[in-house]
Amino acid sequence: EAGVAQSPRYKIIEKRQSVAFWCNPISGHATLYWYQQILGQGPKLLIQFQNNGVVDDSQLPKDRFSAERLKGVDSTLKIQPAKLEDSAVYLCASSFLSSKRAYEQYFGPGTRLTVT
Amino acid sequence: EDQVTQSPEALRLQEGESSSLNCSYTVSGLRGLFWYRQDPGKGPEFLFTLYSAGEEKEKERLKATLTKKESFLHITAPKPEDSATYLCAVPGEGFKTIFGAGTRLFVKA
């Protein structure tokens, strides 16, 4: 079974530039998550999709971050403009829709973003 | 506010030296507790889900237990390949999964 795919794996940009990350979840997983993981911390949920719809984006800095999930499959996360504090690993995860297995999340390798 | 606290921050063991990692939580109405393993440069890998106090789950040298206020991840006779960061998480308000900061485990041969 193919895992969660993410690209790019690494990205270096200057502050005020924009950047986009792509995620392809495991086939059949209705729920997709984007997390931000700062060095030395646990993942922090940015946005959670269930099929095409957003079920939680309460911790997404909406003035600069946006995300979409087209056709309930792939997703993109964009940052515009980037700030120094956005330097982190951005993780995508997916899971089944059922209530118990929903928390069994499968993570991609992440994108390491460095903002200079 | 929902919160997950893990201790210690880092743990160094000799191969074969058993120990435990702690995860304490404050949430209203626990709906489960999850343990993940994260290797450097990789995303977290799901290990266990525990749903009720007294429940235990085992996988190889790892055993997770749950009480009403905390969970323990017991590592029996660890090997160097068990070196990783171990994260615990709980479902928070709404649909959010709240992760702790993790315990970095180093096992020396």
Image (spheres, helix red, strand yellow):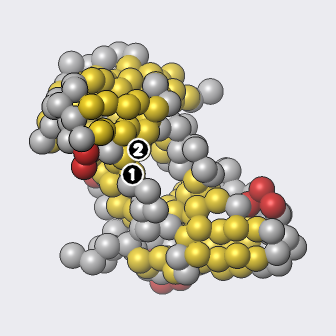
Q: Is residue A41 left or right of residue B59?
A: right
Residue type marked 2 = Thr
| Residue A74 shows up from this direction | yes
Q: Is residue B77 left or right of residue A34?
A: left
What residue is at 64 percent from the left and 59 percent from the top? A88
What residue is at 25 percent from the left and 49 percent from the top? B81
Secondary structure of residue under mark 2: strand
Q: Residues within 10 Å of mark 1 (few under 14, many from 20)?
A: some
**Residue reaching furthest front?**
B109
Q: Chain of mark 1?
A: B
**Residue reaching furthest bottom?**
A71
Residue placed under numbered mark 1 in the picture: B38
Determine which of the numbered discs, if any, sits on residue B85 in the image. 2
Q: Are marks 2 and 1 in contact (CB under 8 Å)?
A: yes
Secondary structure of residue under mark 1: strand
Q: Earlier in the sequence, mark 2 or mark 1?
A: 1
Quadrant where the image shows the C terminus of chain A: bottom right
Q: Chain of mark 2?
A: B
- Residue A36 image point, x, y percent: 60, 56
